[in-house]
């Protein structure tokens, strides 16, 4: 005789047992999905934050390639460019390396001047200062003044310095140049060897990448390109900063002078622009500068 | 007797000709075995797992062929040699008086004397229960070609048997019976019920019920019988005590599962 009640109890237990398996399976499945999405979100967030860093994401690498082609067009290949490539290949390159490269650049610039004025190589400081449209690049010119440069160049450099000094409102007049020059000679040793940190927070990724590149290479054409980019974006003060920076590395760069003048004209400093262009024309002959000067004067 | 108790009787596991259900596979085996009996073979091996229908098939063959083909059945193994020989003698020469000093050797002589004059087929069910010495003698009797043996045994025993060289050397026809498929299970249950005019009950076994039965029994006919027997026992209980619980027009999975629990196919 069957014990039906006992059988029914057993059957209920059996059904519960059967239910447990899918319940456990489904819950494990949902937990897995949840974990997957949370980790995915986390990774996405990480990627987003990393995307602000120039060497993290693929997008950034694409950007890097694009900008590299730009800089390649702008510049001739230099040993510094090689080092920057290496640093691209190893994205985890520390900031120490970057600092080293900066140092090398500065010291190489100094070594150029060493040949002109051995006295200037006395000091090598690791100071870093914010870039502002100052006359640092003029100081380097001044340093080389007494040794080799022709008189014509000296005049140009002092004039440029005075123009930029006026812009910075550091120097009141342009008649005390000789006295200032002697003072600048003293300061020049420090400024020529000091590191320059260029910071720009409102740039997009491409520009930030270019700025980083510039820090590695110190290519004046790249600086001019950055200045031009800022100019096109309507960031004239940044454009002026970068034109000065380009000029400090290569004073003969026509482009840096033009951007400097155009940006100044845009912010209402037409006089400064005209003066700068004239100073340049005293030193060099350039159709572009002449036409720009004409257009500024005619306005 | 209540309806469900009568239904239980249908599924009592018996080796009877009435138990034979003409399923597709069983008809195939039936024809194959009949053909084999016609062939000039010494021995035919019919093997398969318990509950695959060997005994029912042998019974069916015996029932259908006994008059036409001199087929005899030994459904229960005879352990004693002389008793076995006596049985064979009655099959071979039913009309003649059996010699009092009948023995194995004497029987072989009789067989030799009857060579090419008489042929009979003896069906040996549950042959795995014969001692090996007896099996050896059966083999030697089959060598006379007067008696053909159809040996039905479980698969494991068959494997042991075949391992023996002297059996391997014989000309054997082997027929392996297997568990039924899902379709066989369905046909088996419904045909059994319909044979007994329980059309309404047969319709209560829906496809899902058969699936469940097949899942628990794996198509083994003996297990199907057991499960459905228990199922009707449960139905009988509910009919007597809680008739509302079995009022549906189909067999509830719950009661099939309860039967499976009772028989130990599943555990709570």
Image: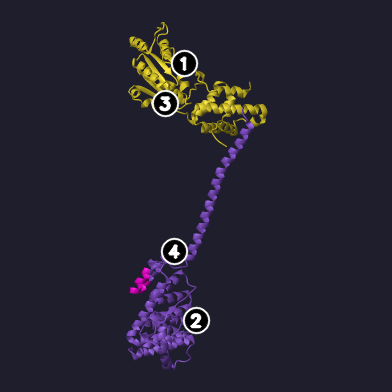
Chain colours: A purple, B yellow
Q: Is residue B52 visible?
A: yes
Q: Is residue A82 in the magenta section?
A: yes
Q: Where does residue A82 sit, x and y in percent of width and height?
A: 34, 71
Q: Which mark is residue B157?
A: 3
Protein chain holding label 4: A
* CB-based contact (under 8 Å), mark 4 and mark 3: no
Could you say which quadrant of the image residue B2 lies in?
top right
> What residue is disc 4 on?
A57
Protein chain holding label 1: B
Residue lying at 42% horizontally and 93% vertically, measured from the top left: A179
> What residue is disc 2 on?
A267
* CB-based contact (under 8 Å), mark 3 and mark 1: no
Q: Where does residue A109 sit, x and y in percent of width and height?
A: 36, 81
Q: Foreground mark, 1 or 4? A: 1
Q: Main secondary structure of the magenta part?
A: helix
Mark 2: few, some, or many residues within 10 Å (few <14, many ≥20)? few
Q: Foreground mark, 4 or 2? A: 4
Secondary element at tag 1:
helix
Q: Which mark is residue B63?
A: 1
Q: Which mark is residue B9?
A: none
Q: Foreground mark, 3 or 1? A: 3
């Amino acid at each position: 005789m069957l014990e039906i009640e006992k059988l029914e109890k057993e059957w209920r237990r059996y059904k519960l047992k059967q239910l447990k398996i899918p319940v456990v399976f489904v819950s494990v499945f949902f937990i897995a999905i949840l974990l997957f999405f949370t980790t995915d979100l986390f990774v996405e967030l990480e990627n987003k934050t990393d995307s602000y860093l120039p060497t993290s994401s693929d997008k950034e690498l694409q950007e890097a390639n694009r900008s590299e082609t730009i800089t390649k067009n702008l510049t001739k290949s230099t040993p510094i460019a090689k080092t920057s490539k290496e640093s691209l290949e190893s994205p985890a390159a520390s900031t120490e390396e970057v600092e080293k490269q900066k140092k090398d650049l500065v010291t190489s610039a100094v070594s150029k001047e060493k040949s002109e004025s051995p006295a200037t190589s006395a000091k090598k400081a690791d100071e870093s200062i914010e870039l502002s449209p100052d006359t640092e690049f003029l100081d380097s010119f001044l340093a080389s003044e007494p040794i080799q440069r022709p008189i014509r160049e000296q005049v140009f450099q002092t004039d440029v310095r005075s123009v930029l000094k006026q812009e910075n409102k550091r120097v009141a007049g342009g008649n005390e140049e000789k006295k200032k020059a002697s003072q600048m000679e003293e300061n020049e040793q420090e400024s020529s060897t000091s590191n320059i940190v260029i910071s720009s927070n409102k740039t997009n990724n491409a520009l930030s990448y270019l700025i980083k590149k510039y820090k590695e290479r110190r290519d004046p054409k790249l600086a001019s390109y950055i200045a031009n980019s800022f100019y096109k974006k309507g960031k004239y003060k940044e454009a002026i900063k970068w034109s000065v920076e380009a000029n400090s590395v290569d004073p003969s760069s026509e482009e840096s002078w033009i951007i400097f003048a155009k940006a100044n004209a845009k912010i209402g400093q037409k006089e400064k622009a005209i003066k700068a262009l004239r100073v340049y024309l005293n030193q060099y002959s350039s159709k572009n500068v002449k036409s720009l000067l004409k257009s500024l004067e005619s306005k | 007797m209540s309806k469900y108790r009568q239904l239980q009787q249908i599924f009592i596991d018996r080796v009877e000709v009435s138990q034979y259900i003409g399923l597709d596979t069983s008809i195939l085996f039936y024809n194959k075995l009949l053909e084999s009996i016609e062939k000039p073979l010494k021995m035919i091996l019919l093997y398969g797992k318990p509950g695959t229908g060997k005994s029912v098939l042998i019974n069916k063959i015996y029932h259908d062929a006994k008059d036409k083909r001199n087929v005899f059945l030994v459904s229960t193994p005879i352990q004693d040699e002389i008793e076995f020989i006596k049985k064979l003698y009655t099959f071979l020469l039913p009309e003649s008086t059996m010699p009092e000093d009948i023995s194995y050797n004497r029987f072989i002589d009789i067989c030799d004397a009857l060579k090419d004059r008489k042929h009979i087929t003896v069906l040996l069910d549950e042959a795995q229960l014969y001692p090996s010495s007896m099996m050896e003698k059966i083999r030697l009797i089959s060598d006379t070609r007067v008696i053909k043996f159809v040996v039905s045994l479980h698969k494991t025993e068959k494997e042991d048997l075949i391992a023996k060289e002297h059996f391997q050397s014989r000309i054997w026809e082997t027929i392996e019976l297997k568990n039924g498929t899902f379709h066989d299970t369905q046909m088996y249950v419904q045909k059994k019920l319909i044979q007994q005019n329980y059309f309404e009950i047969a319709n209560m076994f829906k496809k899902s019920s058969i699936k469940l039965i097949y899942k628990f029994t794996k198509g083994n006919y003996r297990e199907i019988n057991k499960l459905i027997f228990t199922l009707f026992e449960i139905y009988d209980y509910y009919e007597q005590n809680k008739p509302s619980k079995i009022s549906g027009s189909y067999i509830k999975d719950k009661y099939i599962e309860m039967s499976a629990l009772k028989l130990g196919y599943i555990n709570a």
